[in-house]
Each structure stands twice: as structure tokens, then as C-alpha cells.
Image (cartoon, helix red, strand yellow):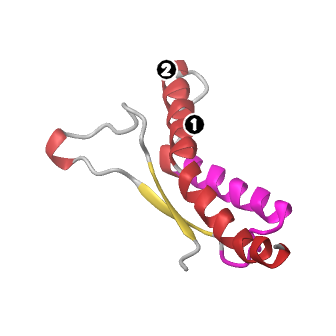
Amino acid sequence: MLKRIVLAAVAAGALVAPVGAQTRPSQIVSARGLDLGRAADVVKLERRIARAARAVCGSAPDWDLKGQIAADRCRTATIVATTAQRDRLVAAARAPALAAAR
């Protein structure tokens, strides 16, 4: 099973490019080295996702309030969009332990 999540900027306005040239920035987040059956490792995965969302969505200078709001919305929307992927990885990691407990 692949243990990775693909993040793509999903918030409207996250990209500024001509319509024909638009591509969504994306980044792969790996769960390699994590035991997603452990809560502490799930937290580590969530940190990786948040860090990747910051990289994908970028930031704005302190004086650019609209840009800061747009970047924050992009990060939030991107993290929310990965929730289902993260949940599937966690469920798959915990499935053997649940089966053994029965």
C-alpha cells in the first residue's frame, strides 16, 4: 500500500497565472517511517501535511493582509482536502490490530 498523500492547492485565488498556463502546485507527503497505528505518528503525519500545505500555498508579506488571508484559506482548504486520504491511511494501518483484537 502506498503511504503518501498528494496535496494540491485548492483554494480559489491561490494561483495567479494566465488561464491557459494554470496548473495546481502540488507536493507529495510521505508517511514513510511512521506507524499510523500509533497516535503520536498520526500527529507527525499531520505536521508533515501542514508543512506541505504551507509550501504549496505560499505566504504573503506582513503588509499584505489580503494575501495573508488568501494563503491562510488556501492552507486550510488544502489540509481539509487531504483529510479523507489521511483517514484511509490511518484506517489501513489500524485494520490489522482491529482484526487481531476480534
Residue 89 point in image, percent of width and height: 62, 66
Residue 91 point in image, percent of width and height: 66, 64
Q: Residues within 10 Å of mark 2 (few under 14, many from 20)?
A: few
As helix, strand or loop, the secondary structure at mark 2 comes to helix
Residue type, numbered disc 2? Lys
Q: Is 15 on the left-hand or right-hand side of 89?
A: left
Which residue is label 1 attached to? 76
Occupied quadrant, residue 29: bottom right
Q: Nearer the viewer, residue 81 or 59?
A: 81
Which residue is label 2 attached to? 66
Q: Is residue 41 above or below residue 81?
A: below
Q: Nearer the viewer, residue 91 or 47?
A: 91
Residue type, numbered disc 1? Thr
Q: Quadrant of the N terminus?
A: bottom right
Residue 69 point in image, percent of width and height: 54, 24
Q: Quadrant of the C terminus?
A: bottom right
Residue 66 point in image, percent of width and height: 49, 20
Q: Is 24 on the left-hand or right-hand side of 79?
A: left
Seen at 58% across and 55% down, the residue is 52
Stretch of the chain drawn in magenta: 32-55
Q: Is residue 23 above or below residue 77?
A: below
Query: What predominant SS class does the magenta segment belong to?
Result: helix
Occupied quadrant, residue 17: top left
Seen at 57% across and 45% down, the residue is 79
